[in-house]
Amino acid sequence: MINPASLFQMKALWDRFVANHPKFPKFLQAASASSIDEGTIIEVKITKANGDTIASNLKVTADDLQLFQEIRNIAGQ
């Protein structure tokens, strides 16, 4: 069971994250609205301040789509 106090703390942290990075949640909303289908490739790249990078990608499966839907349900969308 999820601790309600932890949820309030996460909400406060998320609100601060959104205030600091307002374009990122909009990006996630746009990506979600674009109907990610099975076979879609999601790529993530991180560039550190010193210029080092790391990147990875995944091909979306049916199981992934089920997880994405559950996350949307939890988020109340």
Image (cartoon, rainbow, N blue to C red):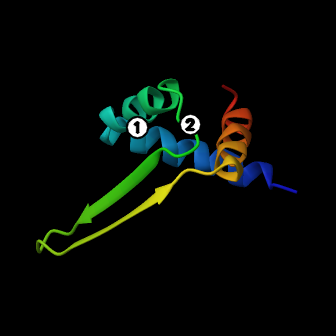
- Where residue 73 sits: x, y (%)? 73, 34
Total marks shown come to: 2
Give the image quarter of residue 28: top left
Residue tagged 2 = 37
Type of residue at label 2? Asp
Circle on res. 44: none
- Where residue 62 sits: x, y (%)? 68, 47
Residue 35 appears left or right of 19? right
Residue 54 appears left or right of 49? right
What is the C-alpha distance between the residues marked 2 and 1? 26 Å
In front of the other: 72 or 5: 72
Which quadrant does the N terminus fall into? bottom right
Residue tagged 1 = 18
Q: At 74% from the left edge and 51% from the top edge, which residue is drawn?
A: 5
Crowd around label 1: few <14 · some 14–19 · many ≥20 (10 Å): some
- Where residue 61 sits: x, y (%)? 62, 51
Pointer 2 or 1: first along the chain:
1
Secondary structure category for the residue under label 2? loop
| Nearest-to-viewer mark from 2 and 1 | 2
Give the image quarter of residue 53: bottom left
In front of the other: 18 or 40: 40
Q: At 66% from the left edge and 25% from the top edge, which residue is drawn?
A: 77
Type of residue at label 1? Val
